[in-house]
Image (cartoon, grey):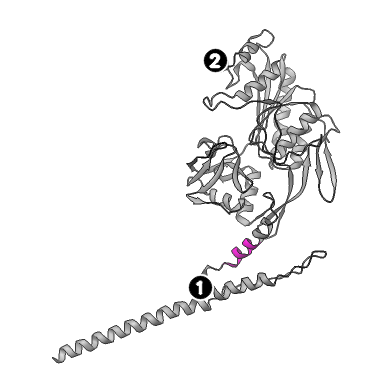
Amino acid sequence: MKNRVRDFRIFIILIIAFLVGYYFGVNKVSFDWQNYKPQIVVESKEPPVGVTTVDFSPFWVVWDKLQTDYYDKTKLDAQKMLNGAISGMVGSVGDPFTLYLPPVQNTNFKQGLAGEFSGIGAELGTKAKDVIVIAPLDGSPAQKAGIKAGDTIVKVDGISIVGLDLASVVDKIRGPKGTKVALTIIHKDTTKQIDVNITRDTITVKSVDGWIKKVSSIDGITQDKAKDKTLEQIIAQDNNANSSVAYIRLSQFGDNTNKDWTTLINNLNIQIRKENNFKGIILDLRNNPGGYLTDAQYIASEFLPQGSPVVSESSSIDNKTLSVDRVGLLTDKPLVVLINKGSASASEIVAGALRDDRKIELIGETSFGKGTIQQAEDLGNGSGLHVTIAKWLTPSGIWVNGTGLKPDVSVNLDPKDPSRDTQLEKAVEELLK
């Protein structure tokens, strides 16, 4: 009997100990969260002279409320909160190309212009509130997986991207080589969502490439593949049988574009001068998402006489025109330009200048339609800011924003025969006429 009483008392003590421990444990967690204060140092700065005075007290009230009342203080990351506040401020402008880039995204952007980064190899942009593919890079994992210019991205790894800014979407898609990412997309002119799995890789962008070939041996338009008998008949004509054309592919305007362009053009020019039956040059700007404005001026100058206008900048402060400022090597050669819906920004500047100044034919599809100029600035902590500072106009005064450049000769690719480049075929045909 005594043993039973003793055991019962021990049992009661254990129950009481458990309940007390649980009570203090739960309340200690609550106490810790309520009293946890991240180590935050706020460095204030007076607004610049001339800036409209704004009452920032609501901002600090919200900041303080989060610090005081949010139940899990460990989730309060001051740097993320600041980045979010800046992104919201920049986003309120309503311009998809005015962006705040936190350090990681800013580094990714710079790597892209430098020509090497890890990801899927697709240039992204926005239209309305949608994130769309401006252009997949040639030979990239995105292109091999079937991603096309004009595709709308709706999910990344099964999670909706609605409401996210462009930089955040890019950050989610990029990642180490060999890892996978799943994109849910909608192809242009369709409504069906499809899932595309892509393995990331190191993307090396060679911004310039080119060659000179006999027209009968150009890949994608050889006579057995040219289902349009018109081209086959033109190639077979006596004066065209041994004719040659030059092809220049410009995939982006990046850090090394001007140097690589000069090297290629010097070599091609030597070969062109040796050709007995040279018909002209095809400049391929398809899926070129753009880049530096000064590079566009440099490239256009290869084909235009000195002093020719290339692009006009128009802002609330100033209007100015950039013109040809060097002697080009190919100003006297026949030329056609290939564009498509992935041709944007600087590539549209080049195409527009060549058409306006030399009446060069544009062949392919209507271009993307990005008619604004951004200024990129480093903010000193690894982050960056892209601000739209002006709109640009072609020499004849056309603003392409939202509408793009319409081709003089409209040609679509054949979706049933990817080995055949109908746009390139048409470009060759136009040079041989």
- Can you give x and y, in whole percent of width and height, for residue 217 in the image? 60, 17
Looking at the image, the residue that sits furthest to the top is 238
When the figure is inspected, residue 242 is found, relative to residue 174, above or below; the finding is above
Q: Answer with mark 2 or mark 1, whichever residue precedes in sequence.
A: 1
Q: Residues within 10 Å of mark 1 (few under 14, many from 20)?
A: few
Query: Residue at label 2?
Result: 224
Q: Residues within 10 Å of mark 2 (few under 14, many from 20)?
A: few
- Can you give x and y, in whole percent of width and height, for residue 106 in the image? 64, 53
x 63%, y 15%: residue: 231
Label 2 secondary element: loop
Give the camera-side residue of 402 and 174.
402
- Observer able to see residue 60: yes
| Mark toward the viewer: 2 or 1 | 1
Give the camera-side residue of 192 and 109.
192
x 64%, y 17%: residue: 215
Q: Judge from the rendering whether residue 431 lies leftward or rightward of residue 182; answer left or right.
A: right
- Can you give x and y, in whole percent of width and height, for residue 288 in the image? 65, 36
The type of residue carrying mark 2 is Asp
x 82%, y 65%: residue: 49
Q: Magenta span covers which residues?
A: 77-85
Q: Magenta segment: does it hold 334? A: no
Mark identifier at residue 71: 1
The type of residue carrying mark 1 is Tyr
When the figure is inspected, residue 74 is found, relative to residue 395, above or below; the finding is below
Q: Magenta segment: does it hold 82? A: yes
CA–CA distance in space, label 2 to label 1: 71 Å
When the figure is inspected, residue 222 is found, relative to residue 381, above or below; the finding is above
